[in-house]
Image (cartoon, rainbow, N blue to C red):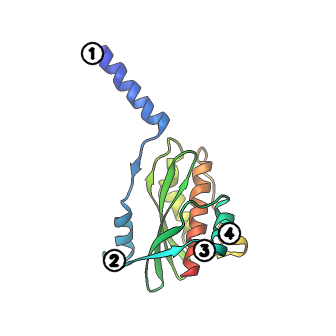
Amino acid sequence: MKFSLRILALTLALAACVHGEERVYKQPSEFIKSAFGGKIPSTSVLRISGGVKSRTKNIMAHNYRESRVRYWKQGSRSVWILEEIGKTQPITTGVLIEKGRIKSVKILIYRESHGWEVSKPFFTKQFSNASLKKGDQLSVGIRNVAGATLSVRAVTKLARLALYFDSLT
């Protein structure tokens, strides 16, 4: 009986590793609250249509599934909670922008089995002070993380998208 329980426990642990496990690093509401000194401003909505939809598709390299994006803004500071698929699962990311530059990027919820290293500060700090330059590229280079290439690409696209969306508000 004990042997069977050990086999079952090992099988469940391996399945979690193979299929990924949702890791909640920070609730989106907590990220928003911390960005604005503890008080969440009212929610605004950006509609994605026409030229915005076309440029969004260029940034993301596919049609963005949302037709409206919620964001929070106070003065020159805005927060965007966006999602992009890494390999097979969405990565929920918070991007704080101030005066057209990224102040911080935080992986809020990570669901992939590989590439979780993008949630670490050594990776997310690379986005600090980045802005959007011609061709919708970041003004800073983002180093890849071995074994996390698709997650790196996803987070980088989201940073670019947040900067573009911020420029519209």
Residue depicted at x 57% and y 80%: 168
Given the image, on which type of amino acid does mark 2 rest?
Gly
Q: Nearer the viewer, mark 4 or mark 1?
A: 4
Disc 2 marks which residue? 37
Disc 1 marks which residue? 2
Which numbered disc, 1 or 2, marks the residue that appears first in the sequence?
1
Left or right: 58 as drawn, with respect to 23: right
Q: Is residue 35 above or below residue 23?
A: below
Which numbered disc, 4 or 1, marks the residue that appears first in the sequence?
1
Give the SS element for disc 3.
Answer: helix
Q: Quadrant of the N terminus?
A: top left
Gap between marks 2 and 3 measured at Cα: 24 Å
**Residue 57 screen position, x and y as percent:** 66, 64
Q: Observer-nearest residue: 68 or 106?
A: 68
Gap between marks 4 and 3 measured at Cα: 12 Å
Give the SS element for disc 2.
Answer: loop
Q: Nearer the viewer, mark 2 or mark 3?
A: 3
Disc 3 marks which residue? 164
Q: Nearer the viewer, mark 3 or mark 1?
A: 3
Q: Residues within 10 Å of mark 3 (few under 14, many from 20)?
A: many
Give the SS element for disc 4.
Answer: helix
Residue depicted at x 49% and y 34%: 18
In the rendered structure, are the residues bearing label 4 and label 2 in contact, judged by CB atoms less than 8 Å apart?
no
Residue depicted at x 59% and y 56%: 154
Disc 4 marks which residue? 54
Given the image, on which type of amino acid does mark 3 rest?
Tyr
Q: Residues within 10 Å of mark 1 (few under 14, many from 20)?
A: few
Q: Is residue 5 above or below residue 40?
A: above
* The furthest residue to the bottom: 75
Which numbered disc, 3 or 1, marks the residue that appears first in the sequence?
1
